[in-house]
Image (cartoon, rainbow, N blue to C red):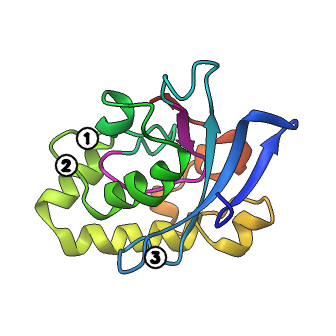
């Protein structure tokens, strides 16, 4: 994982954060997400738990909790996989090829199926407002400028937006 910025939680090798850059040539390019990772005691035989800490607009990622719906992690995890596979393959594929038929975010799914151009524009707005690399690296949370989608929860710090799912 030397290509990633990783920070341990309380010097615990089983709980850490990874800064994950949006895949090139995708609407997520230029964004940076802080991903919370927890390795169970049974790892690699049991899948890690991951969650997006800052907001992301995607059909298969719950906007409020950061939970991820990804079959290869959730249901078909194998000891052949490792953390590197998650960040090099699984998450980039998820962001590039959403499965709108199996959504965690109904609004993103609906928009993706109805109007892909508008979906891409909303993704880019989220990247700008919530995934600014300078803000995330400095430990802050980007805030949405569009008042119509803003709420008190939207203005919480990145650390308060903890959302995970056992994968």
Residue visible at 29% across and 53% down? Answer: 108
Dot 3 crowding, Cα within 10 Å, few <14, some 14–19, many 20+:
few
Residue 126 point in image, percent of width and height: 47, 66
Residue extending farthest to the front is 80
**Magenta segment range?**
48-60
- Tell me, for residue 7, which label it has, or none: none
Quarter location, residue 63: top left
Which numbered circle lies on residue 103?
1
Q: Earlier in the sequence, mark 3 or mark 2?
A: 3
Indicate the position of residue 128 as horizontal and vertical percent values. 53, 74
Residue 100 got which mark? 2
Q: Is residue 147 rendered to the left or right of residue 107?
A: right
Quadrant into which the C terminus falls: top left
Quadrant that contains the N terminus: bottom right
Q: Distance between the Cα atoms at labels 3 and 1?
A: 22 Å
Which callout, 3 or 2, points to the residue nearer the camera? 3
Circle 1: element type? loop
Left or right of 124 on screen, residue 82: right
Residue designated by label 3? 29
State the residue in front, 75 or 100: 75
| Residue 156 visible in the snapshot | no
């Amino acid at each position: 994982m030397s290509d990633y910025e990783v920070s341990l939680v309380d010097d615990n090798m089983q709980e850490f954060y990874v800064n994950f850059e949006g895949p090139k040539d995708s609407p997520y390019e230029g964004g940076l997400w802080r991903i919370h990772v927890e390795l169970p005691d049974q790892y690699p035989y049991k899948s890690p738990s991951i969650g997006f800490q800052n907001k992301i607009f995607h059909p298969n990622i719950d906007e409020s909790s950061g939970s991820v719906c990804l079959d290869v992690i959730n249901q078909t995890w194998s000891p052949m996989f490792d953390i590197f596979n998650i960040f090099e393959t699984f998450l980039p594929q998820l962001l590039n090829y959403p499965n709108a038929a199996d959504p965690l975010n109904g609004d993103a799914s609906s928009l993706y199926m109805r109007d892909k151009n508008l979906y891409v524009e909303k993704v880019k707005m989220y990247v700008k407002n919530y995934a600014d690399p300078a803000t995330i690296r400095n430990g802050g949370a980007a805030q949405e400028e569009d008042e119509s989608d803003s709420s008190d929860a939207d203005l919480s710090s990145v650390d308060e937006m903890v959302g995970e799912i056992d994968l």
